[in-house]
Every structure is written in structure tokens, then in C-alpha cells.
Image (cartoon, grey):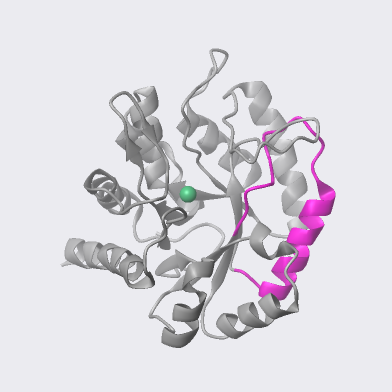
Amino acid sequence: MTNIFNLPHLGYGLGLRAPHYEDILRERPDLGFFEIISENFIHAHAGYKDFLSELRQDYPFVMHGVSLSIGSTDPINQEYLHKLKNLADFLQPEWISDHLCFTGREGINTHDLLPIPYTEEALKHIAARVQIVQEILERPLVLENPSSYIDFHGSTLGEAEFIAELAKETNCGLLLDVNNVYVSAFNHGFDAKKYIDMIPTEHIVQIHLAGHKDYPDYKIDTHDRKVPDEVWELYAYTTAQKGQISTMVEWDEDIPPFAELLAEIEKAKLFIQAKAA
Ligand SMILES: [Fe+2]
């Protein structure tokens, strides 16, 4: 099933990370797309723009941000959004995503993706902000489900229910991070598969996979290791329920040689092929 935005299925991609720039330029790997962290390029000097332009000739791109703070009570940062739009005008990404979270308030950026309360009031507040963002960016905003370690006593909706309502209300796109679902399901004791069932398929345009760190009582979304078997299993369930969706592996700490990352995304391809056979 395709998404309601007619955004393309890009296949299997990776995040564009500095330690791999030379490998990528030299090898031109067989990848469906690259995802950039928008903030790494918003203030990019000309050299980086040349680098992006060169790769853009061979690959579709998507932009993934960490500063939108859609859940904050601060006014929307219009200056940031206009810079984001300028980068998008230059790069022509297939879509622009950020996270369902807030990153601070009263102008303070914690550089953390903090959880929000799942209430009707928050839903109304965030829906209005998504509409503003979509008007400025002139495209659907794509929002990613967070990984979290605490929740709010005041929440009256489940996270998946909140996301489904938000998508319906605003026509935003969704980036389903399967590792985040797994981590949060463990930390909060909800059923990961039921969560995935509740996410509206027609809004999903991308999937993230990643590794996390296990502790006896909780898990932390670390992006510093291979995708574990439990997350591959949940990915298999997701694709069985939702169909094939543009998928990438995130690896942001202890970044391995590029060949190792390519092997991870090859695994995703083989996974899908094996299921289809
Ligand atoms: Fe993610």
C-alpha cells in the first residue's frame, strides 16, 4: 500500500555521516537514498553544498531534523523553519521529518528529544503547530515516534492513539522508528505489535531501524550497534502488516566502517526478499 501523499518507496538507505563521506564518494554504493541530519547542513558552507549537489545527482535524499520542538509551548522558531525551507529548496528532498517531542522551553535547547504528555490539550496544541510548519515548508511534515524513558501521569491517550489522531487531524506523514517502538514498549510495558497496528499505514513514509542498549530494567535508544534480532522481528511484523516502506538503519555513535553499515541495510533487503519468496 502506498502512502496518501504519493511519496515514493525509495528502497533501503543510510544516514549520511561524516566518517563515511570518502567511502561514499569513491564507491557510490547501491543505496536507495540518503538521510541527512538537517542541522548538519543548515549552515553549510559552499564546500558542503558542492558535496551534497554531487551526491544528489545519484541519490534521492530525505531531511531529518532534531530542533523543531513541535511539542514545546515556546513560539514556533520561524527563523529555523525558513532555514530548513532554504535547505530543502536547494536539496529537493523527498520529505522532511522531525520528532514528536519537545527539546526545551523559554528558548533553552536541551539537545534532548523529550517526551510530551498525551492529552487532548496537547493534541490540539501540536496539531495547530504542525499546520503552521506545513504551511511554511509547503509540504507534509513527517513526524517520528520517540523513544522514551518516562511518561506523564496526566496522559489520557496512548502514544500510538495520539499519533494516529494527530496524523488524521493534520494530514502529516509518519516516520515509524521500529527500534523506538521496541525500546518504549519495554520501558513502559505496552505491546509493541498492538502499537504498530494502531499507526495509520497510509501516513507512513519511512521506517528507521537501529540498535539499543539493554539494561536489566530498561533499554536505551543508543544507535551505537547492530540492529538486534528482536527489532528485526518487529520489522518483519511491521512490513507484513504495512507493506514495503522506505527503510534505513541509523548508527550515530561508535560508527563502524562503511562496509559494516552496508551489510546491515543489505540484511533489511534480504529480509524482505525472504518474506516475499
Ligand atoms: Fe529514529
- The answer to whether residue 32 is left or right of residue 18 is left
Q: Position of residue 54 (x, y in %)?
A: 60, 85
Q: Where does the magenta region start and end?
A: 64-93
74 or 24: which is nearer to us? 24
- Asked where in the image residue 46 lies, by quadrant, the reply is bottom right
* Quarter of the C terminus within the rendering: bottom left
Taking the spot 35% from the left edge, 26% from the top edge, the residue there is: 190
Taking the spot 50% from the left edge, 39% from the top edge, the residue there is: 146
Taking the spot 34% from the left edge, 23% from the top edge, the residue there is: 189
Q: Where is residue 25 in the image (x, y as percent from the top left)?
A: 50, 84
Q: How many marks?
A: 0
Would you say residue 132 sits in the magenta stretch? no
Q: Where is residue 165 in the image (x, y as percent from the top left)?
A: 56, 34
184 or 202: which is nearer to us? 184
Is residue 137 visible from the viewing direction of this image?
yes
Would you say residue 76 sits in the magenta stretch? yes
Above or below — where is 66 with respect to 244? above
Taking the spot 35% from the left edge, 66% from the top edge, the residue there is: 261
253 or 126: which is nearer to us? 253
Above or below — where is 37 with respect to 160? below
Is residue 172 visible from the viewing direction of this image?
no
Q: Position of residue 221 (x, y in %)?
A: 42, 41
* Quarter of the N terminus within the rendering: bottom left
- The answer to whether residue 253 is left or right of residue 170 is left
- The answer to whether residue 268 is left or right of residue 168 is left
Residue extending furthest top? 153
